[in-house]
Amino acid sequence: MKRVVLLIVMVLVVGGVLFRLIDDTTGSVTVSLGSYIVQFSLWTALLLLLVAILLFWLIYTGARMLLAPGWRLMANRESRRRQKLIAQYHDALLAVAEGRWEPARKSLLKTAEKLDGSSSTISYLAAAKAAAENGQLESALETLDQARASSEEGALAVDLTRARLLLDRHRPNVALEVLRRVHSAQPVHPVVLSLLCRCYRELEDWDSLEKLLPDLKRSKTLSPEDIFELQVLVRSSQLARFAQASAPAMPAQNADTKPQHGTASQMTQIEGLWGRTEKAVRAAPKVLAAYVRALSEAGAADMGEQILRRALGKSWDNDLILLYGQLESNDSLRQLVTAERWLRDRPGDPDLLLTLGRLCRRNELWGKGRDYLEASLNAANRPETCAEMAYVMAKLGEDKQSAAFFKRGLLDAVGMDENLRPELPRAASRSTTSG
């Protein structure tokens, strides 16, 4: 009851104030339409305006009530069409995962034309992968062109996919063009660096790969162990080019480090490579062996012998000891004496015994060489040991044994079954020409 009384009082007060305002406020609104002039009082004009607004609201509300069912129907149709398209898109991606390449490719191309934004780009990328896996590389590249033309949003993803497809199909030269362009725009992108690293490795472009190493380190694209392995591969491969300098068709990607046949030029370039090699990389047996071979090719076998001798004195490595026996220094007798000192600590080492046999051969100590080689064969039967033994036995006049060792070495080299290989004849006499 109190609220009703309060409401009546408020209406009377507001009505009185409005009546007072209408009574005291004078003014008019004149509307001119061509030759017609209509004049209203200010309050009449305001009342007409309120009526017009109310009328417009009533018309809008009525129209909306009449048209709303049609709008909802159209929205539902579009929603169903979109849901069907998304379902097709998901089915196509599943087809890619299941290896149904051709159906997946066709379906993805259809959905890519109807989707927009990143979904369209992903459809094109998946369609390109399906085409490539189906052996249709050119079709895959054309699909990637369509993806690039449809949107610039996924340009990087398109370029990386193109590079991967080309590398997987053994076309590193074409992939390199794409990756260099992307690298100039994305110099520290980890995937770009990883693919560029892979591309240089396949091209055996060791000089370019060496220049890429600092970026690979800074971006932490590879683990420290992988970086070290890559450094070893790069330096050993660069040095190996000098060891193969006499080969007529040797690849060389950088004219600055291209091996030349002049010994002085070779030494300068070899020492330049070695001078910028990290200490830890220098100690890697693979790098050290490549360095020694390069020195030997450049006419500095004595220097290589000293390096190998010091390295083997610090840390034993089977590949290095075998290289020591193949190294032709000017003092092969000193090499033999050095290797025999190592034999005291490694009496049954087959690699060391093979090396001693080779050094005895170079020094024409045939009987001694036979003993070392026979001990090596007893420890480990190898084709190269059989070949050395055959040569020594021929020098000792044991032609039958020499032929048997050559045959045994050949059968070992081709992997003939142990049970099918003939028995080697035993050495007949140790009193034949001795060293």
Image (spheres, rainbow, N blue to C red):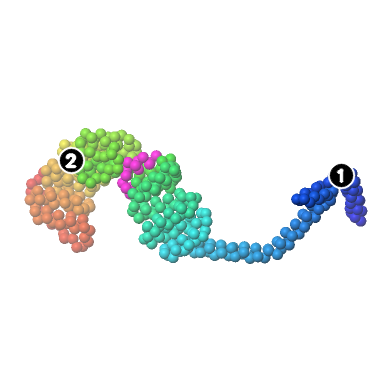
The quadrant of the image that shows the C terminus is top left
Quadrant of the image occupied by residue 405: bottom left
Real-space Cα separation, disc 1 to disc 2, in angstroms: 124 Å
Quadrant of the image occupied by residue 233: top left
The residue type indicated by label 1 comes to Thr
Magenta highlight on residue 204 = yes
Rendered image: mark on residue 328: 2
Residue annotated with mark 1: 26
Above or below residue 193? Residue 275 is above
Local secondary structure at mark 2: loop
Residue 217 seen anywhere in this rendered image of the structure? no
Q: Main secondary structure of the magenta part?
A: helix
The quadrant of the image that shows the N terminus is bottom right
How far from the left and from the top, in percent, is residue 71?
Answer: 65, 63
Q: Residue at x 39, y 47 (%)?
A: 179
Q: Earlier in the sequence, mark 1 or mark 2?
A: 1
Magenta highlight on residue 420 = no
Q: Residue at x 79, y 51 (%)?
A: 36
How far from the left and from the top, in percent, is residue 67?
Answer: 68, 63
Say whether residue 332 is left or right of residue 40. left
Q: Residues within 10 Å of mark 2 (few under 14, many from 20)?
A: some
Q: Magenta segment range?
A: 201-214
How far from the left and from the top, in percent, is residue 428?
Answer: 10, 53
Above or below residue 184? Residue 12 is below
The residue type indicated by label 2 comes to Glu
219 or 291: which is nearer to us? 219
How far from the left and from the top, in percent, is residue 159?
Answer: 42, 50
Q: Residue at x 78, y 49 (%)?
A: 31
Say whether residue 34 is left or right of residue 224. right
